[in-house]
Image: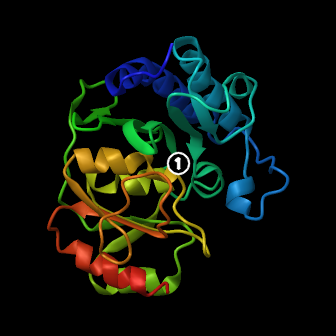
Amino acid sequence: MGAPTPAEFVEALRPALRQAAAIAAALEGRVENEPKAGEDRAAKAALTIADTAAQEAILVPLHEHWPDVCIAAEEDTDTAALFPEDGPARVVVDPIDGTLHCFLGGLGPFAVMTGLAVEGVYTAGLVALPRERVLLEATRGGGARITIGEAPATRASCDGRGRIVLVSPETCDAVRDHLRERGWDPRPASGGAIAVAPLLRGVRAGLRIASGTHSISERGRIGVLIAREAGATVLRGSGDPFPDDIDTEARRLLVAAADDPVLDDLLAAAARAE
């Protein structure tokens, strides 16, 4: 069957992502953490039945449409085992991003995400924030759209207002303190929410700092395509553009509206984590 086009991928997976988000929302507060063995970080080890149920809601229709693609799925579920190791495209799935701190801990928005990568570059992506009832989607070169609740989808763009900056839950005090000194309000969020932060109502920007020596994962980059298609600027800690591919190492992710002065404060804050 080959690989889907970006538009086909978004059209086919939109209902699946909505269902996965609805499952996560319905189970929030009703499930317990059953940590995965072999993970060195609590955030990576966190697992609930909501993660596996939401993942299956995405993978079942994906396999029905495109069984030949390869996948990078967060959890080991039955349908995940049906896909080949190599394929004409790579589909990345994170059924609940921010399981430990945001879904179970309630610290901020968690996300449900999937993206289509061809030759190591995302060509389509969908990010849902179940608690906020927001769905964002984009295709490369085709712009980004946002759906809030049951309202019709509209073109996504940077909000450009507010003082909220979404940051990683593990962000150190030095980074948070610098943002506060500059007049911003840092609030914790999952990586998926941070990547699309300036597209959310009342949120000005996002700053993600990977733990230790880790790089921002391929899952954490799905929202970068959406943010850029909506007109946002996405940088790494050096101030250079954030990598366009899913593999190049990058330990910092800064996102805001183009030419927004908050970007200078984000760069200065990120430097405090060195």
Closer to the camera, 95 or 225?
Answer: 225
**Residue 168: image location, x then y, percent:** 50, 66
Position of 125 with respect to 139 (left or right) is right
Q: Is residue 5 above or below residue 98?
A: above
Which class describes the residues within 10 Å of circle 1: few (<14), some (14-19), or many (20+)?
Answer: many
At x 32%, y 79%, the residue is: 267
Viewer-proximal residue among 115 and 206: 115
Can you give x and y, in whole percent of width and height, for residue 69 in the image? Answer: 56, 25
Which residue is depicted at the point 39% across and 71% down?
A: 186
Towards the viewer: 248 or 234: 248
Count how many numbered circles sit on residues in the image.
Answer: 1
Q: Say if residue 201 shows up in the picture.
A: no
From what the image shows, is residue 207 above or below residue 102?
Answer: below
Res. 181 image quadrant: bottom left
Question: Percent position (x, y) of residue 235?
Answer: 32, 67
Tell me if residue 174 comes above or below residue 238 in the rendering.
below
Residue at 26% from the left image edge and 50% from the top image edge: 228
Q: Give SS at disc 1.
A: helix
Disc 1 marks which amino acid? Arg
Residue 131 left/right relative to 141: right
Residue 222 position in % (x across, y down): 43, 46
Residue 159 makes an appearance in the image: yes
Coloring applied to the structure: rainbow
Residue at x 51% of width, y 61% of height: 216
In this figure, which residue is indicated by the disc labeled 1? 219
Tell which residue pokes out farthest to the right in this image.
Answer: 37
